[in-house]
Amino acid sequence: MTNTVPDARQTPNGATAPLLDAVRVSKHYGAHQVLTDVSLQVASGEVVCIIGPSGAGKSTFLRCINRLEVPDAGEVWVDGQPMGFEERGGRLHELNEARLSKQRASTGMVFQHFNLFPHLTVLANVTEGPVHVQKRKPKLVEAEALQILERVGLGDKIDSYPSQLSGGQRQRVAIARAVAMKPLFMLFDEPTSALDPELVGEVLTVMADLAADGMTMLVVTHEMGFAREVADRVVFMADGGIVEQGTVDEVLVHPREARTQRFLERVLK
């Protein structure tokens, strides 16, 4: 499969291209259209929170960005490179699975349900990707992993197994695992939705620290307080599309669209 490299990637007046550029992404499952022409740009260092009702297509959009789901139409560009493709001779050639996995490592992903390897210790979970996917030196990776685990408050759990941890601890391991891959940006798919309420804060604190350190983040969340405190921009999605986006004040305090207003009235009660 090949495609001509589109002219749409040219930025006006020599402006710096966004770190993430999703262009008219669409996805359907059978007769059900999940995403329709969704376009979103995220600049380096920006934190963007995506909110919206269940079934809006938020999680599918994130999975299309790192090609865990293949869009039916549209393109995703990461740091100027087409996701799932490489450019050769002015055309785009689809990557095989092995090369796609390496490219996908540039986008750290944190899921709702942790997805840790149950048979590996905390430290082994964090070092697995850098050593076996990125082929980095094990001793160097282990030293970096220990630093990251200390940073997320799990320096004393390196020899524990996921089954011995609380949900909040497991999610912090998942975040550490993603950070250890040194991604260009992080994708968070409702990372606190599977946690008991008393454990949510510890995960949000780690995420806020990453944002404060300049990590580029795209976060699907129902935690409005987190979005208010951390987001540079908020995107409201419904029915497979972006209804509106803007600053925290523009979307969460003074939304323009009636659908956004109705959603916020329900979730902020």
Image: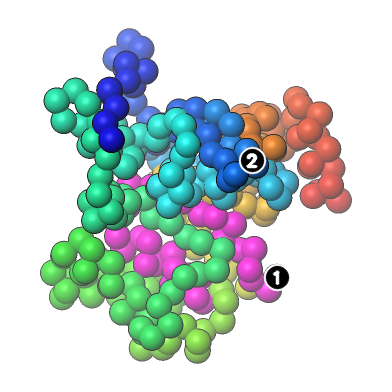
**Image location of residue 199, percent across then percent down:** 63, 73
The N terminus, quarter of image? top left
Marks 2 and 1, the one that precedes in the sequence: 2
Q: Residue at the location (61% across, 63% down)?
A: 192
Judge whether 259 appears above or below 90 on screen: below
Verify whether residue 185 appears in magenta.
Answer: yes
The count of marks equals 2
Q: Residue at the location (71% across, 50% down)?
A: 54
Identify which amino acid the numbered label 2 is placed on: Ala
Judge whether 169 appears above or below 11 on screen: below
Q: Residue at the location (46% across, 39% down)?
A: 71
Judge whether 98 appears above or below 146 on screen: above
**Image location of residue 79, percent across then percent down:** 30, 36
Q: Which residue is mark 1?
A: 197
Query: Which numbered disc covers residue 85?
Result: none
Per the rendered image, the range of residues in magenta is 169-198
Question: In the image, 158: left or right of 250?
Answer: left
Q: Secondary structure at mark 2?
A: loop
Question: In the image, 268: left or right of 62?
Answer: right
Judge whether 255 appears above or below 149 on screen: above
**Image location of residue 211, percent across then percent down:** 46, 50
Q: Does any portion of residue 238 appear in the rendered image? A: yes
**Residue at the limit of the structure toward the top, as seen here:** 13
Q: Secondary structure at mark 1?
A: helix
Q: Which residue is mark 2?
A: 31
Q: Residue at the location (28% across, 67% down)?
A: 129
